[in-house]
Image (cartoon, rainbow, N blue to C red):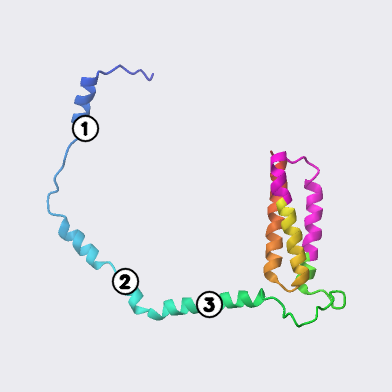
Amino acid sequence: MNERTPIGEAELRLALRGLRRDIEPTRDLWPDIAARIGALPRQGASRRRHPWLLSLATAASLAAALGLAWQLRAPPASAPATPAVASAPSLVEREADSLTVQYQAALRELDAHPVPANWQPGIEALDRSAAEIREALRAQPDSRLLLERLRATYTRRLALARRALYA
């Protein structure tokens, strides 16, 4: 059904020349194009209307950076270390403990399957990171940032274990 007849090079060139046709427009198009471009709003004009917007964005970024630095600051050297046993665990600590229990339960189900040997360094690195984050949470029990890092590390480790099921 789909029979092709061989065509020679000269015939092909002749056929290609027949396809090309330059068509001249009937009128000059540039005045219409220039009018449309002139009607578009300028990008620089919006910047000049709101010069305070850049200042506001800079101030917000600075406030966010200071807030983060305040959360991550080291405790004063002269303050005595308070024993963690004496005080009740904070909300972040309880959430981290709950997260760890759920993570370990999910990991027990997934670790029954063998993991490729070349994945082992990545798994060990994620396990070390989780342990370091848990240790940092003991030092800073109210750090939401550390809790989010722990959650992300657990999520990556479980995703790697899930991928091992199909490897």
Q: Quadrant of residue 133?
A: bottom right
Q: Categorize mark 2 by other alpha carbons within 10 Å: few (<14), some (14-19), many (20+).
A: few
Locate residue 128 relative to residue 10 in the image: left or right: right
Q: Give the residue type that dot 2 points to.
A: Gly
Mark 2, secondary structure of its residue: helix
Q: Categorize mark 1 by other alpha carbons within 10 Å: few (<14), some (14-19), many (20+).
A: few
Q: Quadrant of residue 24?
A: top left
Measured along the vertical axis of the image, is residue 91 above or below residue 98?
below
Q: Which residues are magenta?
A: 97-124
Of labels 2 and 1, earlier in sequence is 1
Measured along the vertical axis of the image, is residue 84 above or below residue 19?
below
Is 43 one of the magenta-colored residues?
no
Residue at left 72%, top 78%?
75
Q: Categorize mark 3 by other alpha carbons within 10 Å: few (<14), some (14-19), many (20+).
A: few
Q: Give the residue type that dot 1 points to.
A: Leu
Eye-nearest disc, 3 or 1: 3
Q: Which residue is mark 2?
A: 44
Which quarter shows the N terminus? Answer: top left
Q: Which residue is mark 3?
A: 62
Q: Give the residue type that dot 3 points to.
A: Leu
Residue at left 71%, top 42%?
164
Image marks 2 and 1: residues in contact by CB distance under 8 Å? no
In percent of width and height, residue 3 lies at: 35, 17
Q: Main secondary structure of the magenta part?
A: helix
Tell me the CA gap for discs 3 and 2. Answer: 25 Å
Measured along the vertical axis of the image, is residue 45 above or below residue 134?
below
Of labels 3 and 2, earlier in sequence is 2
* Closer to us: 102 or 86: 86
Residue found at the very far right of the displayed protein:
86
Q: Which residue is mark 1?
A: 19
